[in-house]
Amino acid sequence: MRQHRAELVSIRGELSAKIEAVESKIGAVETRLDSKIDAVESRLESKINVVDSKVDVLRSEVRSGFSALGAALENAVLRGELSTTREIADLRIRVERLEKERGQLPQ
């Protein structure tokens, strides 16, 4: 019985040592995983910042494009109004000429 007890104590000691070794290895693996996770998070954050920056540039370009489009449309409208005004003035001159010619013709 004493021999069995001694063997059990010996096995218990070996198991305790092995358990401590496994726990140590698990701790090392956890540390490495934490380090790798931190590195991945850092890279993702960096890439997200790059994407955010590119989105900001795109927003700025879109705003600029819409501003330019608005200005171009406004210029086109003004040119159209100016052209229409000229055409109306030309028509008035023609009408006045025709009225004068009719007034001068014997009826």
Image (cartoon, grey):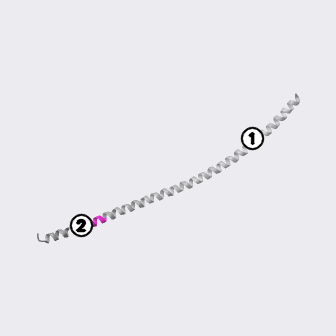
Q: Earlier in the sequence, mark 1 or mark 2?
A: 1
Mark seen at residue 83: none
Q: Residue 79, image x and y in percent?
A: 33, 65
Q: Residue 29, image x and y in percent?
A: 72, 45
| Amino acid of disc 2 | Leu
Q: Residue 70, image x and y in percent?
A: 39, 59
Residue shown at the point (70%, 48%) measured from the top left: 32
Residue that mark 1 sits on:
23
Q: Is residue 59 magenta?
A: no
Up-down relation of residue 106 to residue 27 (above or below): below
**Element under label 1?**
helix
Up-down relation of residue 17 to residue 105 (above or below): above
Is 21 situated left or right of 6 in this image?
left
Residue shown at the point (81%, 34%) measured from the top left: 12
Q: Outermost residue toward the front?
A: 107
Characterize the magenta stretch by its predominant secondary structure: helix
Is 7 situated left or right of 90 in this image?
right
Q: Is residue 85 magenta?
A: yes
Q: Nearer the viewer, mark 1 or mark 2?
A: 2
Is 97 situated left or right of 73 in this image?
left
Is 57 situated left or right of 39 in this image?
left
| Amino acid of disc 1 | Glu
Point out the stretch of residues depicted in magenta. 82-87
Mark 1 is surrounded, within 10 Å at the Cα level, by few (under 14), some (14 to 19) or many (20 or more) other residues, namely: few
Question: Quarter of the image containing the C terminus?
Answer: bottom left
Q: Residue 88, image x and y in percent?
A: 25, 65
Residue that mark 2 sits on:
91
Q: Nearer the viewer, residue 42 or 68?
A: 68
